[in-house]
Each structure stands twice: as structure tokens, then as C-alpha cells.
Amino acid sequence: AALVTVLAALCAAVSVLFCSVLRGAGRLCGRAFRSPYLRAAAGGAAVALLSLVFGTDYLGAGGGVIAAALKGRSAPWAFALKLLFTALTLGAGFKGGEIVPSLFVGATFGCAAGGMLGLSPSFGAAVGMLAVFCGVTNCPLAAFLLAVELFGERGAALYLLAAGVSYMLSGYSGIYSKQRILYAKDGLVFRGGGPSQDSP
């Protein structure tokens, strides 16, 4: 349980980073390119160049990479590259979602970090996936139920622990700008604002 708590805390920090990078990329691209056409062209060119260097695993949903992470196989830098690809894509104005990239980032980070902590890399990927998802959405119950649905009831207590830790430590950062958090989070470490901000 202690190792799961540590991993969930690390995932909370990753979820704050995820939200901050996506917001920052949008602001930066908007300031750099006033024309949405130039913005899209520059962003598309950057993503294309990166895909030539790092491959196409980081384009699209990345289901194959997620599946590999859940089997205990993931490059330690995969989560960072996916975050970079996602930030450039959304920052350039292309339509897409944040949920599946957060699952990718969580699974690959959890696989790598879990293995370093002494957990099974495949179990670490499962915990990472639910914990980062929880951190970016501020939806601990949904994250817990998703984990039980995907991975079974055997680790339910640890999934619940991971969701709770990530929720409390991720602060008020989130991908939903209009989200209302009714009860204040106490004892935050990675606090990304407060209840009076965008995600109260």
C-alpha cells in the first residue's frame, strides 16, 4: 500500500504537469501565431517532424502503447513524448481530446515509475492510468470504477487508495475549465490554484 501511495502521489504531480503544459501550449501558440491558419500549419509541421524522429507511436490514441505498458513494457520517456505531441496538437488548434492522452501518459509513466519503485510494471501501469486520469479530471469515483471495470476487483482497495491520493494531491488543476469542486481539498502538495479559480 505504501508503494501505491507513492506512485499515486507521483501521478498527481504528472497530472498537474499535464494540465499546465496543455494550457501553456495553447497560450504560447496563440501569442506566437495570430492567424489560426499559420498556427495550424506550424503545429502540424512540428508534429510531423517529431513523428519522423520518434515514430508514430505517439500519434492518435496509442492503444498499442497502452496495451504494452499494461503488460509491463514501456520506454521511460514515452509519457513525456506523448505529452509533447498532445500539447503541440491541441495548442496548434487541432481538435482532439485530453482523456485518452491522459490514459496513455498515466499507463506509460506508471509502468516506468512503478517498476523503479519495486511494483510490478504492469500493475504500476494500471495504477498510473487511473491516478493520472483522476488527477486531470478530478473524478475519483469514475477513475476507481474505470479501474475495476478494466482490471477486475482483485486490486479494488489499492485502486481506491490511488484514486484518493491522486485526487487530494492534484489540487485544483484540471482539464475542465468550468468544473465546480464543491468541497475544498485539504493538505495539498501539488496545489494548482484554489476553489475560486477556473476549477473551483
Image (spheres, rainbow, N blue to C red):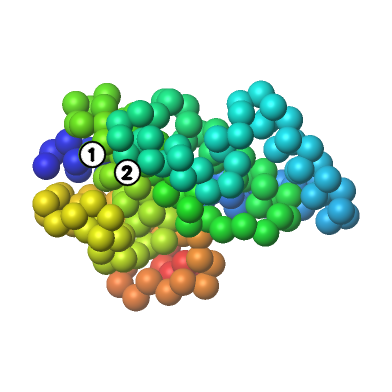
Side of 169 where 24 appears, left or right? right
With respect to residue 139, does 90 lie above or below? above
Quarter where residue 10 is shown: top left
7 or 196: which is nearer to us?
7
Kindly state the secondary structure of the residue where label 1 is placed.
helix
Kindly state the secondary structure of the residue where label 2 is placed.
helix
Foreground mark, 1 or 2, reads: 1
Residue at which label 2 appears: 128
Amino acid found under the numbered disc labelled 2: Gly
Which residue is found at the position 47% from the left and 27% from the top? 77
Which residue is found at the position 48% from the left and 31% from the top? 78
Quarter where residue 120 is shown: top left
Where residue 40 sits: x, y (%)?
A: 80, 50
Of labels 1 and 2, earlier in sequence is 1
Which residue is found at the position 41% from the left and 41% from the top? 66
Side of 181 where 20 appears, left or right? right
Which residue is found at the position 14% from the left and 50% from the top? 155
With respect to residue 113, does 107 lie above or below? below
151 or 38: which is nearer to us?
151
Quarter where residue 34 is shown: bottom right
Where residue 178 sits: x, y (%)?
A: 52, 72
Residue at which label 1 appears: 123
